[in-house]
Amino acid sequence: MALVNTALYDAMEQGDHSTLQRLWLDSPDTEVSCVHPGWPVLRGRGEVLRSYALIMANTDYIQFFLTDVEVSVMTDTALVTCTENILSGAPAEEEGQLGPLVGQLVVATNVFRRTEDGWKVWSHHGSPVLAESDDDEPGGPEGPADDGLLPG
Amino acid sequence: MALVNTALYDAMEQGDHSTLQRLWLDSPDTEVSCVHPGWPVLRGRGEVLRSYALIMANTDYIQFFLTDVEVSVMTDTALVTCTENILSGAPAEEEGQLGPLVGQLVVATNVFRRTEDGWKVWSHHGSPVLAESDDDEPGGPEGPADDGLLPG
């Protein structure tokens, strides 16, 4: 199960859009959904797969170091949570140069559905981690303190 | 199904922790998970329910206006995405005064599992929306431009 989760990130790293198309659930009865960090909800294969094409077009280099991968399975549904330690580079302004590398800490909840063709992605929700998880008490009703900064 | 989703937010609004305990899945085989906006992943009933107690203790007033509620059901699993338009107030510094009200735009993916006792929350993932969803092209590999601001 964790292997399918890894495959999702491998496809992103390799800019392999056709593998992404294969990994995302394709069912007439069920609409997939996707939230990229800081984005609104995207719904349906068309919208979701276009967003990945857009991200890939704007990314020269991306690497995911997954940590804290936890899998919870109930019959035909699997829920994976993980931390995405992302290192990425946008296309450079000038050809032949490498764009600036950026580190990002993101947590994700990925929902998979078992099909005849294996486990498929039903939902991906990624969000930026804005505060440390240790004893700092996060303020606000549903969020960290306003002065929360990206770690690292 | 959407009613159970609403019940989750009603319980938050009313600071009703015992209803939250009843709504969250309680299964020996399955660990629940929860991501509040900007937070790391919380796992297990103990950690998740403690986080709600903490949020409630730091919130004098909170109201959720849910929009874009979409439900996707496959047998015993339901996936709900929605936009949480949140208006909240922290406790005032001085007794008898109202704390400052804050508006927040959050998107959520909520996963529910059907049990003998009705639908229960398996996972909640909420994240801040940092960019508009219209034609603005978000920058970065997995996130909006750094200058993305909370709308409103």
Image: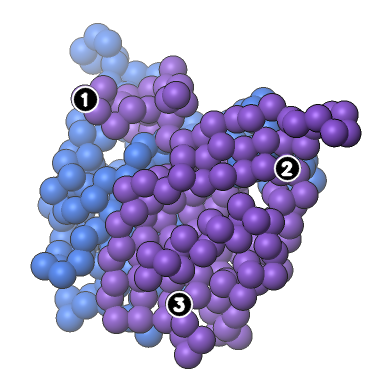
Chain colours: A blue, B purple
Q: Which chain letter matches label 2? A: B
x and y, in percent, of residue A140 in the image: 67, 38
Local SS, label 2? loop
The crowd level at tag 1 (other Cα within 10 Å; few <14, some 14-19, many 20+) is few
Q: Is residue A100 left or right of residue B8?
A: left
> Which residue is found at the position 46% from the left and 45% from the top?
B65
Res. A118 image quadrant: bottom left
Amino acid tagged 2:
Asp
- Sequence-first disc among 1 and 2: 2
> Which residue is found at the position 49% from the left and 31% from the top?
A103
Q: Which residue is mark 3?
A: B119
Amino acid tagged 3:
Trp
Q: CA distance from mark 1 to mark 2?
A: 37 Å
Residue situated furthest top in the rendering = A94
Which quadrant does the C terminus of chain A fall into? top right
x and y, in percent, of residue A122 in the image: 28, 63
Name the disc covering residue B135, or none: 1
Local SS, label 3? strand
The crowd level at tag 3 (other Cα within 10 Å; few <14, some 14-19, many 20+) is many
Q: Is residue B59 left or right of residue A124?
A: right
Name the foreground residue: B3 vs B148: B3
x and y, in percent, of residue B91 in the image: 78, 37
The crowd level at tag 2 (other Cα within 10 Å; few <14, some 14-19, many 20+) is some
Q: Which residue is mark 2?
A: B60
Which quadrant does the N terminus of chain A fall into? bottom left
Name the foreground residue: B93 vs B27: B93
x and y, in percent, of residue A31 in the image: 21, 61
